[in-house]
Image (spheres, rainbow, N blue to C red):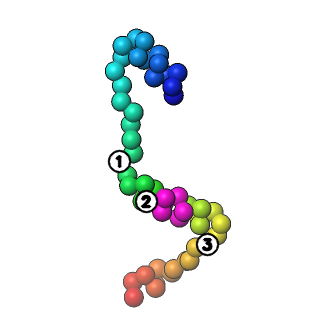
Amino acid sequence: MNAIKAFMKALKISFEESKSPYNPEFIAKIKQGEEDIKAGRTTKISLDDVWK
């Protein structure tokens, strides 16, 4: 990344680093959920139970 920044600066090209619009805590929860799914830590609910 530093090499790209230096290259763009040498060519006088303006740039901004993009930052995630999401809250870091939210991202951590999503990643934890994905890990839980991969590890099989899930609960299945039948459609009949959803509409009770």
Q: Secondary structure at mark 1?
A: loop
Q: Secondary structure at mark 2?
A: helix
**Left of 37 or right of it: where is 50?**
left
In the image, what residue type sits under mark 2?
Glu
With respect to residue 30, does 3 lie above or below? Answer: above
Residue in view at x 53 percent, y 64 percent? 33
The C terminus: image quadrant: bottom left
Q: Amino acid at mark 1?
A: Pro
Identity of the residue drawn at 42% across and 59% down: 26
From the top left corner, tell me how far across and down residue 12 is, in percent: 36, 13
Of marks 1 and 3, the one in the foreground: 1
Decide whether the magenta segment is chiefly helix, strand or loop. Answer: helix
Q: Name the mark nearer the viewer: 1 or 2.
A: 2
Q: Which residues are magenta?
A: 28-33
Q: Which residue is mark 3?
A: 41
Distance between mark 1 and mark 3 Cα atoms = 29 Å
Which badge, 3 or 2, is on the more N-terminal residue?
Answer: 2
Q: Is residue 5 left or right of residue 42?
A: left
User: Which dot, 3 or 2, sits closer to the camera?
Assistant: 2
**Other residues around mark 3 within 10 Å, as few (<14) / some (14–19) / many (≥20):** few
Q: Earlier in the sequence, mark 1 or mark 3?
A: 1
